[in-house]
Amino acid sequence: MRRKVPLTDRIRQVMGGAIVLLLLLPLAFALNGCGETPLVKVGVGEKVITPPVGTPMAGYRREGVSTGVHDDLYARSLVIEGANGNGTVFMTLGIINLNERYMDEIRGMVSNKTGIPGDNIIISCTHTHSGPSIGAASEDYRRMLVDNAIASAVEAWESRVPGRVGFGSTVELELGKNDRRMEYGGLHPDPEVGIIKIEDAKGKLIGVAFNYGCHPSTLDLHNLEFTEDWPYYSIKGIKEYVGEDVWVAYYQSAQGNVKVGYTAELSAVGADMGIRNFWYAEHKGNMMTWTVLEALPEIATSGNFTVAAKSQFFDFPLLEEYHMTAKDAEKASNEAKAKLAEMEKQAEKLGVRVLDSYRVDVFVTGLQLGTAKWVESNPDPKPLTMRMQAVRLGDTAFVTFPVEVYSEIGLRAKEKSPLEKTFVIGLASGHGGYMPTKEEYLEGGYSGVMTRYSPKCEDVLINASEQLLAAVTDK
């Protein structure tokens, strides 16, 4: 493993003179607070949701259970009450996903305890691939997860004070990579980072949130320690400079095809890549740390804006046809397995990457077979009904995406928004699965061959986003 370089040393190496600016951050925040008496109220809360060691882990194709905790997983909540009295909750959970039943329970109890309408409560997941498998976890843990998620929002509500909020954005080009386009450089289709800056009435910084589309999947299936992955290091790094008492949170965006630099196929087969360790997770996380810290002082805050929210269910069509029959898919799967077995007999004569490519073939053809069988067993599938939400806070809007949506789709939805500052919060419906672009269905690949959503879903999602955003902006 490469030598771990202390965070402060990396600052001097990479940032140079910028460190002076960062040391002045507290003063900049205090000066920014001078001005009108806030009509807005803000509150933050967080609770630990780490499962017991021994709980099965989610992400990839792990067969083992957790053996330790590298860093705690959290439920983090932000409450913003507008000048018009409307309140909203932005909750983020450090897990891979959570089903609709639990999200509805959390939303209902938070509404009951705070009076904030359920339509105004956004619940999303960071999608860490080193968290628990909720379905395989104990009922005691699921109860604790739900209770602590509720408690994080109630804490935010009860701690709210008059304050100011600012919304801004910047870009981070190197953290996330388009794993479906690695051969073409892997550039992130939408590298925008949304930033929320939260202050009290005196201008003291009390919270920072960042929104970015990228899987927390630096660690692979060989890691058996719970961790929030690269966002843990981003949050830790930001706190080192703005203060340990400042609440910091990460909200996932459209990230279906964005990882930290390797393809989902190689991740799934457990390809041996030595760089997939905590050093690299810290390296990736620190990229976001500095991206946020550089942008933060320039974000102006306001204590006088209104809040509007809209929630609606939309029907998303499922696959009605597939590019191959189940019989042909089974043949392809068997051929791939036979070829891998043949190649493994010659392992000493072949490079590791050659064998990995055959393992990927077995994996992908297995996915094809599963999807082909599903399509033939469901000749007239009913659409899947999923919740989407939009919240406007002054001149800024957020729209939720239901599942793992491709970054290009999120970008198109933002481009159609009536508000220039529009951000996507992903994995916010209680449902799972990839939602690729139309092109990906033609090109194949991991998510293209295994998704059960119709190619029509791209247009449904963009149109739904446009409809919700128009509703909260009166445009």
Image (tube, rainbow, N blue to C red):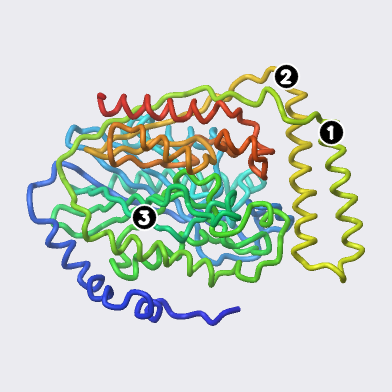
Q: CA distance from mark 1 to mark 2?
A: 18 Å
- Quadrant for the N terminus, please: bottom right
13 with respect to 264 (left or right): left
Q: Which residue is mark 2?
A: 379
> Where 427 falls versus 238 (above or below)?
above
Q: Which mark is residue 328?
A: 1
Determine crowd level at label 1: few under 14, some 14-19, many 20+ residues with C-alpha closer than 10 A: some
Q: Amino acid at mark 1?
A: Asp
Label 3 Cα neighbours within 10 Å, binned few <14 / some 14-19 / many ≥20: some
Mark on residue 76? none
Query: How far apart are labels 3 and 2 at the CA level?
Result: 44 Å
Q: Choose between 248 and 173: the one closer to the eye.
A: 173
Q: Quadrant of residue 441?
A: top right
Element under label 2?
loop
Is the residue 302 above or below the residue 306 in the image? below
Sooner in the amino-acid sequence: mark 1 or mark 2: 1
Q: What secondary structure is marked by label 3?
A: strand
**Which residue type carries mark 3?**
Val
Residue with the mark numbered 3: 171
